[in-house]
Image (tube, rainbow, N blue to C red):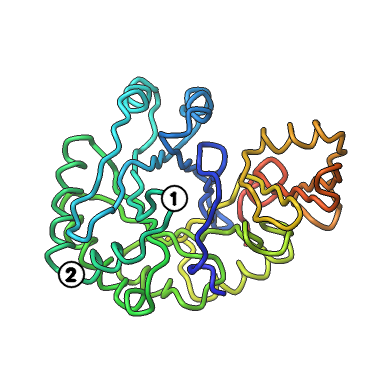
Amino acid sequence: MGFDKRLRARALSLGVVLICTFAMPSAAKPSLTAFYVPWDVTGRSDLAAHLSAVDVFAPFWIALKTPDGIPTIAPDDETSALNANTRPGPVVMPVVSNAHDAIWDGDTADAVINKPESRTALIATLLKLAAEKKYGGYIFDLENLSAHTLGALPQFVFTVQTAFKASHLEIWVTVPFGSTDWPARAIQEAGATVVLMAYEQCWANSTPGPIAGDDWFGATLAAEMRGLDPSNTIIALGNYAYDWPKGIPAKALSVGQALQLAHDNKATVAHPATVQSRVHLYSDRRYPSRRLDARWRDVCPSARDGFNL
């Protein structure tokens, strides 16, 4: 099953998904981008503590729920005020997503991408918002797309980028890591920065395993970069966990929740030398073969030290 066909159950909050820019050998320290979802109240304190260290702030504020292209804007006055009072403040690039009501709404995204009137309505709304709120651009996270829409995605990106050019707005587009279906190079050539989602080697409904083991990460990244421009490529690193009770889909956890669960089950945190993905393995009375896998930035050398490929 292709990655883009999975309905991902990852927990999205500040500190759960972090992004580092792909740095060339001569590049300075990689910049840091953080995704944030306003409905996760536990992430708000993390946001307050770390926002000053973030270069690009990517809140999930804009959702595509209807095929007419008119987006739903999530009210988040508290976070907006926090960002406005942070010095130095990050560049704000809200995420435009087709995730809502626990689904990735492929049908709606297909309609918005393929219908000229829907594209026009979306672009007009985004330009107006950016002018009012001083946004630096937008990150498009559109998933569960049809094969036809994937083919049309570069033209959609070109249309958006052309409309954004006069306002100097950036456009980033998320792309599944290792997917052969997504036209990543064509998306770049159309004017977008590509965000490679370098996680979900194993996912909620898969066989239990690492979220992003080093062997998988390294080989997949090398293959991806053969056709991409590093200066317009972002590597997204997952910072979350999955708990796999035997026989049922995994539950997505934050790193803090994962550590607490391991502690509650008297588990020792194992950090195998050959796998840079911190793993907790334990059994309990209810689920004899229960497995917990976690990966986060603190134990990812490439995220900590920068990408020098």
Horizontal and vertical percent for residue 87? 39, 22
Horizontal and vertical percent for residue 257? 67, 34
| Quadrant in which the C terminus appears | bottom right
Front one among 16 and 228: 16
Determine the residue positioned at 14% across, 44% down.
Answer: 128
Determine the residue positioned at 30% across, 45% down.
Answer: 62
The three-letter amino acid code for the residue at tag 1 is Ala
Badge 1 local density, few (<14 within 10 Å), some, or many (20+)?
few
Using the image, determine if residue 246 lies above or below residue 259. Answer: below
The three-letter amino acid code for the residue at tag 2 is Lys
Check whether the beta carbons of the residues at disc 2 and disc 1 lie within 8 A of each other: no
Identify the image quadrant of residue 111: bottom left
Using the image, determine if residue 264 lies above or below residue 203. Answer: above
Sequence-first tag of 2 and 1 = 1
Side of 264 relative to 226 (left or right): right
Side of 249 relative to 90 (left or right): right
**Dot 2 corresponds to which residue?**
115
Badge 2 local density, few (<14 within 10 Å), some, or many (20+)?
some
Determine the residue positioned at 48% across, 68% down.
Answer: 4
- Residue 102's mark? 1
Using the image, determine if residue 39 lies above or below residue 222. Answer: above
Secondary structure state at the residue bearing disc 1:
loop
| Quadrant in which the N terminus appears | bottom right
